[in-house]
Image (cartoon, rainbow, N blue to C red):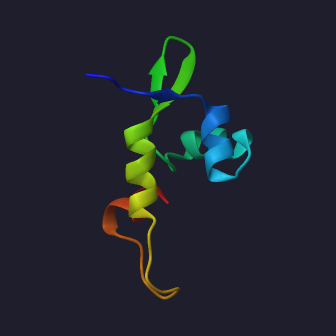
Amino acid sequence: MSIKLLTADQVSEILGIKTDTLRIWRIQGKGPLFKKIGGSVRYAESDLTAYLDAAGRTSTSQKAPAAEAAVA
């Protein structure tokens, strides 16, 4: 089993947001799932993909799925 772990810098670049935004989201319980390994924060590529998949919408009036609404 091979799990690719990404740094906050890598995830912020992929999402086009600041690393500070990811830090705030972690504090608030929002955003993609993350792993705390020792003192390091890492994001599994599969968790980031799932987060992005859940963010998909077909219209601007579409509500967030229940699971995402809990973290958004």
**Residue 60 located left or right of residue 4:** right
Residue at figure coordinates x 45%, y 65% from the top left? 55
**Residue 68 located left or right of residue 11:** left
Q: Residue 61, percent across and down?
A: 48, 88
Residue at figure coordinates x 59%, y 28% from the top left? 7
**Residue 34 located left or right of residue 18:** left
**Residue 11 located left or right of residue 16:** left
- Decide: is 45 above or below 1: below
Question: Which residue appears farthest toward the left when viewing the image?
Answer: 1
- Decide: is 68 above or below 42: below
Question: Which residue appears farthest toward the top when viewing the image?
Answer: 38
Q: Residue 5, percent across and down?
A: 47, 27
Q: Count of labels shown?
A: 0
Q: Residue 68, percent across and down?
A: 40, 61
Picture quarter with the N terminus: top left
Q: Nearer the viewer, residue 8 or 3?
A: 3
Residue at figure coordinates x 55%, y 25% from the top left? 41
